[in-house]
Image: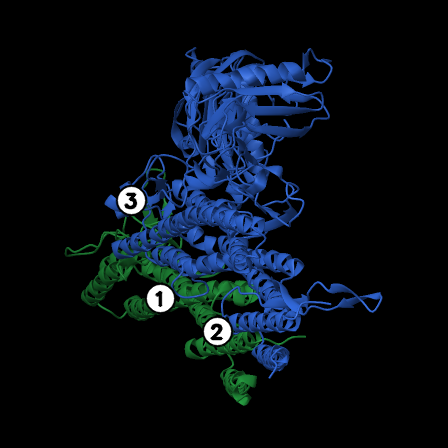
Chain colours: A green, B blue
Amino acid sequence: MRITTNLMSHNLLRSLEQANSRMTLLQTQLSTGRSLTKPSDDPVATETALRMNNTIASMEQWKKNASEALSYLESTESILSNMTAMLQRIRELTVQGATGSLSNNDRMQIAQEIDQLTMQFQVLANSQVNTKYIFAGTKIDAPPVEAYTGTGTPPAITKWAGNDKVLEIEVGPNVTMPIAINGQQLFGITFNSDGSANSSFFNMLHELSTALRNSDHEAINASLDKIDIEIDNFLELRSQLGARTNRMRTIYDQLDNSIINLKQTLSQIQDVDMAAAIMEFNSVQNTFRAALSVGAQIIQPSLVDFIR
Amino acid sequence: MYSSFFGLELAVRALNAQQSALSVSGHNISNASTEGYSRQVANIRTAIPLTLLGSGKELTLGTGSILDSVTRARDSFIDRQFRLETSKYEYWAGKQSILSTIEGMMNEPSQYALSNDLSNFWNAWSVLANNPQNTGARSALLEQTLTLVDTFHHLNQQITDIQQDLDSSVSAMVNEINTIAKQLRELNIQIKNAEVARNNPNDLRDQRDALVDQLAKLVPVRVIETQDPAFTDRTVGIYKVIIGNPNDPKNVLVDDQHVRTLTTVAYNGYQQAVWSDIDSSVTNVGLPINGPITINDGDQIRINVDGISYTIDLSSLKGTYDATGTFGLTFVDLANSLRTVINNAINANSGPAEVEVTFTGTNFVISSGLFGPDSRIAFEEISGSFGRTFNVATGLTPKTGNTGTATVTVLGGVYNGNGNTLKATYIAATKAAITGNILNGTVDFTGSTIALKLDGGDTVTLDLGTLENSATGDASYDLSDPAQREEFIGALQALIDSEPTLKDNLKVRLTSDNRIELINESPNAGTSSVLEVEVTGSAGKLGLNGSARGTDSYWQITDNGIPPKSAVINGDTGTVEVAGLTIEITDALDLADNDSFTLDLTIKNRMADLGFTTAVVSNTVDLGVEEGKLAASLEMRDSYLEEFRAKINTLVKGIADAVNALHYSGQGLQLETAGLAFFTSTDGMPITAANITVNPLLLNDPSRIATGLRNDPVERGDSTIALAIASLANDWTRLQDLINQDVFGPGGAPPVQASSFADYYGSLITDLGVNSQQAIRMSEGQAVLVNQMYILRENVSGVSLDEEMANLIKYQKSYMSAARLVTMLDSMLENVLNMGITR
């Protein structure tokens, strides 16, 4: 087989080109840190990487949602604990008012404190977290109760502007969690056929106040039972809220862990193994140098140099 | 005896021969690195010997050497293989570079690409779902949507840009082919002139071969070299170059001294390569037809004749055709009708020429009447139902067990909705009924009465105190107890039945949620059925006070587009316009509630049934299979990029349809009576990546973005719709009801054929990656083959300096020896001359 001058230089060029292109590829990988820069590098891995990126993005959003929900739940919890404390106080006052040794005047004082507490309850029924009225169900833009601001015994409420749906947020694929408690259940709201509302809670407070002012012992004792029922109701809903808060925390932690795991897997798919790439780069570089020096040695001399 | 100067002559010949051979070697050495140069070999042969008569017998003496010819060392078989492999390599390299451009355009996987924009879009809905009342979240969603819409526009534009780049490169390549062809012709003339003069124009031949190599990169090339029979005493060649598919007789580019040119004609906005001297029209031959063909209302074909597309409605060709006319119509009739109908469309649009349609006995054939490069026939795809016209009659599908009949006719119009079916449901006239409260609690009916008035007749008053509870004996019932509830209803019915005017005309029943209901069962139905009730006393707890009227029957006609278009026909028969079509219902008999009929609006493209495919038949150059850069550019521009664009459009339309379908059923912070679409198109046509935009009503007023279900009064905290749209990032779960109603396609089809939008997009990118990887591998493999061929060629035709140097030594020594011979002969002749001189 004849070896011509052109052939030798052509071959040298070709091997240099190949070594060069390999080095360029490794250089790109090392400088971007990615072994997967375009779909043709590894189509199947690209699909996996895309899918994982989508899942990670969704999970980050759910994590944010869970965090927002936790703050909402915790605010609701503190309001409820406030309310429970107030209810306990009302119970104490009622027990005090039920003793026969008190004068009518004293009962009057107690009634006034009960009235103040009732008005405070009405204000708390209109509490907001993040501009949302938390006890109004999904009608979050209007206060559910018309808070009484006058003097004297606040009347039992007759209007409730909320509904019994519960706000939900998304914390997983098609997974939503309620983040509020049912305001209507808390205050025992029922509706009449003409649209007006009755609240067993506020009715109880109104009856108590009236009973104290009239020194109606029977009514005061009856109220005591009703207060206990209301306290049980509050505690049940508080524990429900507590359970939801715990669940939300668990979901938050789970999402956190999942995101870390996914990111790790994603890195394994698309990131370059630095050590391996650098080793390969060195070896290709050596090959390149060898090709250069050998090529230089065989290209130059020919018979021309040796014929005088 | 021979001449005295014979030896000298011989030596001189030797000197000449060696000197020429030396020059040839020198020529080789100086051209050692010239591109396309093939080594020339000096063929020195012995000169014609001299026959002498001497010593009584014939002697043959050699007369030296002469340079017979200088030939070039070239193997045409290796040339042919080299060109073949080069064409293939250029095809794959061209394809690889374009695919790599597309990969760069999509820029996946990265943080700056479409998949990221989509994720952000779904996340923005999730953020909005957390706080639907927050105007900030609404504005953020709109901004994210505008980014997404911009990305779609941008991708669409980039695909068009790449196509236009390829278009100009196609024009450039065609020009280059023409230039090379002209140069080949010039060289052919020069070479022929030289050959006729018995010369050996090696360098011209080298140039010619180099040009053909260049041509082989653009299109597959085949060279046929034959001997010209007109010259019998010398070797003169005929050089023919065929490009493209060698089996196509039209593909001769250069035929010795005759050259043809290519030109470009526009088709669908892009340049196609055609022979400029074709003077024939094209014919599209369909596949053989086997069974009968039935043409129905609404069938269409779409045909491009000589560059203009026509959509032909085949409704006037309704009927069943077959080869022998069993159903009254033959295929020949169909061919004639098709010809008439297509030519009518061509004439209406002032097309250049009419077509001819014939049936050959086994298949249909359609030819264009136009001659020349612009002649073209192509069948095109039709999809969807937008823009469909038809008139059809169909029968009623009664609800199971019913015997109703009606005739439904579409009188005309152009469908302008987004769906693919039109459904009409009959709602029968209802009778008057009053529903009361949920029954609970203890009610004592003593002393209460109920006054009943049916259809404007006399008022009948019943005394409820006469009811007797079997448990207590008096008129009080504990309605929380199911047994007592039942008993109460039964007793009340008995009381009503005791009145002759009310018996069989008024029924009492308990609904599924334990409410009491009075129904006027008299034969009147519709608005003439009236029920008035007035109660006194504790019976008020039943909540039955009031009056009620029945509703008349009507037809509800709706398409399944997004958003749907609907209309109502009051009564049993009538005409109405819905979604651009005029629907008439007549001859209604025995209709019952929920009888319905469905019209399939999808256009049936009969192209395949007639045996035709979407192939473009024209005078375009048949460029063979997977060879040449021109073929790669044309294929990428016309089929690959268009399919890619179609897939992106499917994704865009799917997203728009799904989001719109969910958005349409909701409302934002204000009361909406009719739903709004979230995505609309800028030009009123079906949504594609080019024309998608956000509904301007929402851009003006972000509070109208639907987050919750439609409700009066507005529940601002309801985030059902926003959550449903956000869940589209994962799968179709929240879309399942709509999918089952065939909103996105028949047979419960989801918006895109995948398990989610991300899945569909992922497979699109994977396909691109696989195609690109294949192109890289094929081009690398081909590059190795091309290299092999190059080595083989160099092997035969390359100049080896060592070899030339050795030759130089050889010729030089021969020359020196010949010169020595001259010196010797010179001195011998000197002796001869001196022989005659006497002292």
Q: Amino acid at mark 2?
A: Lys
Looking at the image, residue B333 sits to the left or right of residue A228; the answer is right
Q: Of A32 and B680, which appears nearest the observer? A: A32
Q: Position of residue A290 (x, y in %)?
A: 54, 87
Residue extending farthest to the right is B56
Q: Disc 2 on helix, strand or loop?
A: helix
Q: Looking at the picture, does residue B107 appear above or below residue B495?
A: below
Which label belongs to residue A68? 1
Q: Position of residue B302 (x, y in %)?
A: 51, 28
Seen at 43% across and 10% down, the residue is B457
Q: Which quarter of the figure is the C terminus of chain B placed in?
A: bottom right
Assess disc 3: are there few (<14), some (14-19) or many (≥20) residues with their C-alpha within 10 Å of its C-alpha: some
Residue extending farthest to the front is B839
Q: Amino acid at mark 1?
A: Glu
Q: Is residue A167 visible?
A: no
Q: Looking at the picture, does residue B601 appear above or below residue B11?
A: above
Residue tagged by mark 3? B698
Q: Disc 1 on helix, strand or loop?
A: helix
Q: Looking at the picture, does residue B424 appear above or below residue B24?
A: above
Q: Position of residue B265 (x, y in %)?
A: 44, 37
Which label belongs to residue A263? 2
Q: Are marks 1 and 2 on the same chain?
A: yes
Q: Which quarter of the figure is the N terminus of chain B placed in?
A: bottom right
Q: Amino acid at mark 3?
A: Leu
Assess disc 1: are there few (<14), some (14-19) or many (≥20) residues with their C-alpha within 10 Å of its C-alpha: some
Seen at 40% across and 46% down, the residue is B689
Query: Do callouts 2 and 3 mark residues in contact (Cβ within 8 Å)?
Result: no
